[in-house]
Amino acid sequence: MAYVAVKGGKIAIEQSILRLKQERLRFGEAAPVKMIENSMRLLVDQVMSEGSIYCPSLAALAIKQAEGSMEEAVFLLRAYRSALPRRYYSTRVESADMQIERRISAAFKDIPGGQILGTSYDYTHRLLDFDLLEESDEQIQKILQQFKEADTDARIAPETMRMPKVTDYLRSQGFIDPTEPDDSEPKDATKETLIFPCPRSMRLQILTRGMTQAVTALGYASLRGYGVAHPTVCELRVGRLPITIADPVNGDDEENEYVIGEIKVTEVESLIPVTRQSEDGRKQNRFEIGYGIAVGQNETKTIAMSILDQCLMHPDNSFATSDEEFVLYHVDSIEATGFISHLKLPHYVTFQAKLNSARKVREENA
């Protein structure tokens, strides 16, 4: 495709950038980054997930700079991430070590440790709260005081924040096939070329970095019949995971690993019924697990990710949601928005060629 370079537009570009800054500040005030970080928690989580970097303050800065545009904020964060040095690789994280903040199951009413509703809009009325238009500092402090004075029995004690996995119960009952641990080196989609078929580690990485709306839309399409998976959420958990690195001097000494911090994640394990044939030829009902995980509280995206994970483990050319190349190429926010946005660039040469062809055909027909 041919492009024409735009020359002589330096002054116009500078004025366009100045106008952009003026538009952001046209009311004479701007939201502080810390306010965005504190009051737009779920938006910050989405930007971190798609930007593939865990730093709430940087995500809030990107949101401010992009005036709330998700695609622009993710672009800024990905660009910043690409320039960062990678000094260490963390050791393997066990999600069973998660410090639970929210934990629900759609498969069982009673689960070991109990269901913890935590923070969610699932249980609120979807009605506009006009009281927020005039929310005062006194009202804010009153709500915070109410939470502080709430019954401590309703809160999670630190010693009970780590809970068993619900899938372990089904596995112990023989409804989930045992699997051998896979200790192979995971593939990194940010450092290696995407080649099909790709390993599951790379698929999961691309999905967790994927555009929230795209992952959700494809998961929804699978549920509506354009795929093979209609799962039951065995367990959805939101909590914090410790991140450790090996000893820089003696990397093989697991006892000297260093905890460098923790990240908040959402993890989903979905159950999909399958039929297995035993050695004696009898058919048996089993369940396979679809897996999803994303930084921050990204529940809808993570559930959809678990659906697509299951779909991609069973390739089927009759469904787009089971086509690895289709899904992985089209959920990435930078690839998608970048290619769509490039249509705004000058296409003078190609369009004039099409226009000349159309004129020639018209003349011949006349």
Image (cartoon, helix red, strand yellow):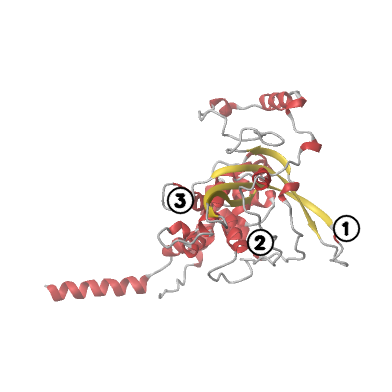
Q: Nearer the viewer, residue 275 or 259?
A: 275
Query: Residue 87 shows which numbered tag?
Result: none
Reading the chain from its start, which is encountered first: label 3 or label 1? 3
Dot 1: few (<14), some (14–19), or many (≥20) neighbours within 10 Å? few
Check disc 1 and report its element: helix, strand or loop: helix
What's the amino acid at mark 1?
Glu
- Residue sitting at 60 percent across and 52 percent down? 291
Q: Which residue is mark 1?
A: 255
Q: Nearer the viewer, mark 2 or mark 3?
A: 3
Q: State whether residue 65 appears in this view.
A: no
Q: Which residue is mark 2?
A: 81
Instruction: Judge left or right: residue 188 versus residue 245.
Output: left
**Image quarter for residue 342?**
bottom left
Query: Residue 222 shows which numbered tag?
Result: 3
Q: Position of residue 166 (x, y in %)?
A: 66, 42
- Residue sitting at 71 percent across and 23 percent down? 146
What's the amino acid at mark 3?
Ser
Reading the chain from its start, which is encountered first: label 2 or label 3? 2
Q: Where 197 falls versus 263 (above or below)?
A: below
Q: Nearer the viewer, residue 313 or 153?
A: 313
Distance from the alpha carbon under mark 2 to that under mark 1: 31 Å
Check disc 3 and report its element: helix, strand or loop: helix
- Residue sitting at 45 percent across and 71 percent down? 6
Residue ranking furthest to the front: 280
Distance from the alpha carbon under mark 3 to that under mark 1: 44 Å
What's the amino acid at mark 2?
Arg
Q: Position of residue 345 (x, y in %)?
A: 43, 66
Q: Position of residue 356 (x, y in %)?
A: 25, 74
